Image: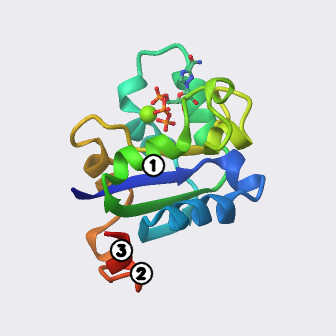
Amino acid sequence: MTERTFVMVKPDGVQRGLVGEIVGRLEDRGLKMVGGKLMQIDRDLAEEHYGEHEDKPFFDDLVGFITSGPVMAMVWEGQDAVQQVRTMMGETDPAESAPGTIRGDFGLDLGRNVIHGSDTEPGSNEREIDLFFDEAELIHYERVDEQWLY
Ligand code: RTP
Ligand code: MG
């Protein structure tokens, strides 16, 4: 099923110059970027985005970290895009992420795990996309290799 997912290079990933590497991996897999912007998240947006974790002990650290520097917010589209990206990301804890995954290759610390991708809970992806992007910011086009991907 073709679907969209929200992906964000977190502040550690931007500061470490990993935007190009991460975008390249998603492109190589065949996913299509349909929206993207570098932005600084304010506290309100961070708290809303991570609302499911508001009662967790790590919530304040999480919000503090995600607002600490610019992030690269993106929307990617493709077959089973949500699960594809989660598979490419690895586990939440980089220490448990296999080499070859984004967190397994670039992260060590649970709080600084380089990338966010929508989880597979139904509706999470569209909720996050709506939070970060206006519909007019999402571009409809075909990749030249699309007929070879599917
Ligand atoms: P994300 O939402 O950032 O893509 O990460 P995720 O789905 O893999 O993990 P999630 O459970 O949604 O947790 C969100 C972020 O909170 C931090 N965290 N810290 N100290 C802890 O036990 C703990 N657990 C989670 C992580 O930075 C995680 O990415
Ligand atoms: Mg999550």
Q: Is residue 67 visible?
A: no
Q: Quadrant of residue 53?
A: top left
Q: CA distance from mark 3 to mark 2?
A: 23 Å
Q: Which residue is mark 1?
A: 85
Of circles 1 and 2, which is in front? 2
Q: Give the position of the C terminus as an image quadrant.
A: bottom left
Helix, strand or loop at label 2? It is: loop
Q: Is residue 4 above or below residue 46?
A: below
User: How many C-alpha atoms fall within 10 Å of the one at disc 3: few (<14), some, or many (≥20)?
Assistant: few
Q: Nearer the viewer, residue 82 or 130?
A: 82
Amino acid type, label 2: Asp
Between 49 and 16, the residue placed more toward the observer is 16
Say the numbered circle drawn on residue 107.
Answer: none
Q: Mark 3: which secondary structure? A: helix
- Look at the image and tell me whether residue 59 can be seen: yes
Colouring rule applied to residues: rainbow
x, y (%) of residue 136? Answer: 29, 76
- Residue 145 - label: 2
